[in-house]
Amino acid sequence: MSQLGYIRKITPSDSTEYLPAFTHIQAGVSGTVTIENATGESTLLSAEILAKMSIVPVGAATKVMATGTTATDIYVWV
C-alpha cells in the first residue's frame, strides 16, 4: 500500500507544473478535472468518478489543467 505524502491545494492552470509529481487528487466541489503527466498525456477525470472516490489515484501527474476542469476546491498529494 502506498503512503500519501503532503497535501497541497492548487488552482488549475494550463502552464503550472507541479514537481515532484502528485499521485492522488481530490475535488471538493463536483465537476470534471483534466490532469497531465510529465510526457504531456492528458486524462479527463469525470465528475462521477470524483464523486464516488474521496481520493483518486492518478499515477504521477504534473499538471491540473484549467482547460477541461470544472471542479473546484482541488487538492493533490505528493
Image (cartoon, rainbow, N blue to C red):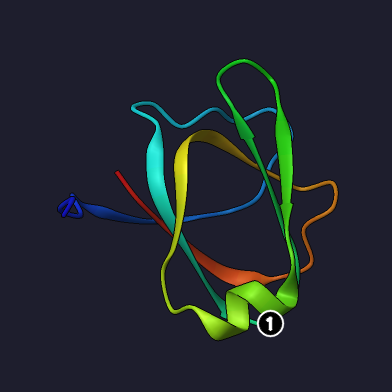
Residue at image location 60% in from the left, 74% down from the top: 50
Say which of 72 and 52 sits in front.
Answer: 52
Residue 12, image x, y percentages: 65, 50
Q: Quadrant of the N terminus?
A: bottom left
Q: Quadrant of residue 14?
A: top right
Crowding near the residue tagged with mark 1, few <14, some 14–19, many ≥20 C-alpha atoms within 10 Å: some
Residue 64, image x, y percentages: 62, 45
Q: Secondary structure at mark 1?
A: loop
The amino acid at mark 1 is Ser
Residue 14 is left or right of residue 29, and the answer is right
Residue 34, image x, y percentages: 72, 49
| Residue at the far front in the pictured view | 1
Residue 38 is left or right of residue 46, and the answer is left
Tally the marks.
Answer: 1
Q: Is residue 46 above or below residue 2?
A: below
Residue at image location 75% in from the left, 66% down from the top: 32
Q: Which residue is mark 1?
A: 30
Q: Is residue 51 above or below residue 18?
A: below
Residue at image location 69% in from the left, 20% down from the top: 40
